[in-house]
């Protein structure tokens, strides 16, 4: 099966999910790699690119980040904003309905992250775009999925239900991603491919093959928060 990863596709998936027909899309827990990779960073500004129902953006906001959360699907953003309201973190979140393959944020962020987002443009081109929005000294965190030719289910991130396979072009290896990060401009801190199992709404299990890349953009000067700590950098 092939997909057109356009607005219509994603809006339909989120509407189906809202009606209970979309597997495990929009389950509430943040992606486990997000706290692991960013939990030690001093909060500053963050972009969640392809935020879906907002679990990661809300997690970041609850930890003090000022988050811009962008997605192409109005249905996803409506659900995310309602969750944020219930969580009491709305004031630190800005929801942006946009096509990230064409959007210009007009600013750089201390953290740019994306989890399983794959727009209609080539995956590595998408990662190039969002990497360009990381401020000097800031962090890029990419969580994606690896195509699995032989899997019996899953493989489309925790947001999709078991039995849903992404095509190879929606997938990128850790080596392919880090090869685009010029080492004079980036320090790669994490580059790994790992397996995990997730459980969907109906208790069904999916085996996921993930790719996780974290890198910091090298800088000459840095920005400090009100305590003099370097934003986007580990707490020391
Ligand atoms: C598999 S979902 C992942 C959602 C969320 N990050 C998560 O992990 O639960 C991919 C998300 O990317 C969004 N997306 C896809 N193409 C996009 C584009 N061109 N611009 C903005 N968002 C896009 C979709 O609407 C969807 O919410």
Image (cartoon, rainbow, N blue to C red):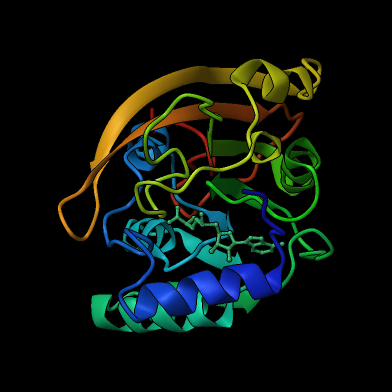
User: What's the residue at 40%, 21% (across, down)?
Assistant: 194
Regarding residue 72, the answer to whether it shows in the image is: no
- The x, y position of residue 160, in whole percent, is 41, 54
Determine which quarter of the picture holds residue 207.
top left
Q: Is residue 44 above or below residue 195?
A: below
Dividing the image into four equal quarters, which quarter contains ligand 1?
Answer: bottom right
Front residue (pair 71, 59):
71
User: What's the residue at 50%, 43% (across, down)?
Assistant: 165
Q: Check the image and name the residue furthest to the left.
A: 203
- The x, y position of residue 5, in whole percent, is 69, 59
Q: Is residue 72 above or below residue 213?
A: below
- The x, y position of residue 13, in whole percent, is 50, 69
- The x, y position of residue 124, in whole percent, is 76, 36
**66 to the left or right of 196:** right
**11 to the left or right of 217:** left
Front residue (pair 98, 184):
98
Determine which quarter of the picture holds residue 183.
top right
Regarding residue 163, the answer to whether it shows in the image is: yes
Determine which quarter of the picture holds residue 39.
top left
Q: Check the image and name the residue furthest to the front.
A: 1
Is the C terminus in the top left, top right, bottom left or bottom right quadrant? top left
**80 to the left or right of 149:** left
């Amino acid at each position: 099966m092939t997909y057109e990863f356009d607005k219509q596709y994603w809006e339909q998936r989120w509407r189906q999910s809202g009606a209970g027909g979309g597997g495990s899309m929009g389950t509430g827990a943040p992606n486990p790699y997000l706290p692991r990779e960013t939990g030690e960073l001093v909060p500053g500004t963050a972009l969640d690119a392809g935020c879906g129902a907002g679990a990661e953006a809300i997690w970041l906001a609850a930890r003090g980040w000022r988050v811009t959360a962008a997605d192409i699907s109005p249905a996803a953003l409506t659900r995310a904003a309602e969750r944020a309201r219930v969580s009491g973190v709305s004031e630190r979140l800005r929801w942006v309905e946009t096509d990230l393959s064409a959007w210009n944020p007009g600013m750089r962020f201390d953290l740019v992250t994306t989890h399983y987002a794959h727009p209609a443009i080539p995956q590595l081109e998408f990662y190039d775009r969002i990497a360009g929005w990381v401020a000097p000294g800031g962090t890029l965190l990419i969580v994606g999925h690896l195509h699995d030719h032989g899997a019996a289910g899953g493989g489309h991130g925790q947001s999709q239900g078991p039995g849903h396979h992404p095509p190879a072009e929606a997938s990128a290896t850790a080596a392919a991603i880090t090869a685009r990060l010029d080492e004079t401009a980036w320090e790669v801190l994490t580059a790994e491919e790992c397996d995990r199992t997730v459980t969907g709404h109906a208790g069904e299990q999916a085996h996921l093959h993930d790719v996780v890349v974290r890198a910091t953009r090298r800088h000459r000067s840095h920005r400090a928060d009100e305590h003099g700590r370097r934003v986007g950098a580990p707490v020391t």
